Image (cartoon, rainbow, N blue to C red):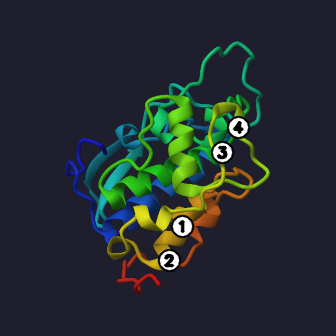
Amino acid sequence: MGSRRRVGQPITETEVRRVMRRLLGGVKVMHEHGVVHCDLKPANVLVGKEDGRGRVLKICDLGLSRSATVPPPDTSEHIQGTLWYMAPEQLMGETDCSEPVDLWSLGCVMAELVAGKPIFQGDSVPEQLGEIVRLLGIPDEVSLMPLGVSASTPSQLCDAVPEERLSPAGFDVLRGLLEFDPRDRLTSVAALQMPWFPVKDDDAPSPARE
């Protein structure tokens, strides 16, 4: 999908909604079968032919995937995944990650589709966490001081996502996917039940964001 998107150019909200409906649906199926992908990003989404409702999307490269029910081995000596799309808990060294990491990654993909570029572009784990905190803020009970990251900044996500490119209903989905705490993050099922996704995929225009 990364190579198909126009470089530096965001796509329309209608297109973003179609893409996200399909990606969330694919992740929902994986999670129902106990599989966590752990490395979702545009480069791991194959774009196929039109099927009457848009292009067929296929999630690929499950090389880092793991079982949602079986604890990972204690042999990993480094963080695995693609830095710009990794959830905060992965960046903070949590090895027993589960379904929420995939939803965070989809939030990063959605933001990239809307904004036309990745919204978190750190060159290292501390830098990536700093990018996340500066844009989203973090819950008061979470401390990143050992990494030299201040948690005092409020969320600025609405400033990073152009209002003219994403409606209030779409922004609610994005914000829910990019919750810092995995316990508060949307699941694929909950995301697909949000008002942004109509029962019929007619992709009617959404009202302006306040």
Question: 10 Å neighbourhood of mark 2: few (<14), some, or many (≥20)?
Answer: some
Q: Which residue is mark 1?
A: 173
Which quarter of the figure has residue 17? bottom left
Q: Which residue is mark 3?
A: 99
- Residue 145 numbered mark, or none: 4
Q: Quadrant of the N terminus?
A: top left
**Which label sits in the foreground, 1 or 4?**
4
Q: CA distance from mark 3 to mark 2?
A: 23 Å
The residue at the far right in this view is: 141
Of labels 4 and 2, earlier in sequence is 4
Q: CA distance from mark 1 to mark 4?
A: 29 Å
Q: Which residue is mark 2?
A: 169
Horizontal and vertical percent position of residue 81: 52, 29
Horizontal and vertical percent position of residue 27: 55, 49
Horizontal and vertical percent position of residue 124: 49, 28
**Secondary element at tag 4:** helix
Say which residue appears at 72% left-offset and 24% top-offset. Answer: 72
Q: Is residue 197 visible?
A: no
Determine contact: label 3, label 2, CB under 8 Å. Answer: no
Question: 10 Å neighbourhood of mark 3: few (<14), some, or many (≥20)?
Answer: many
Say which residue appears at 46% left-offset and 38% top-offset. Answer: 84
Q: CA distance from mark 3 to mark 4?
A: 26 Å
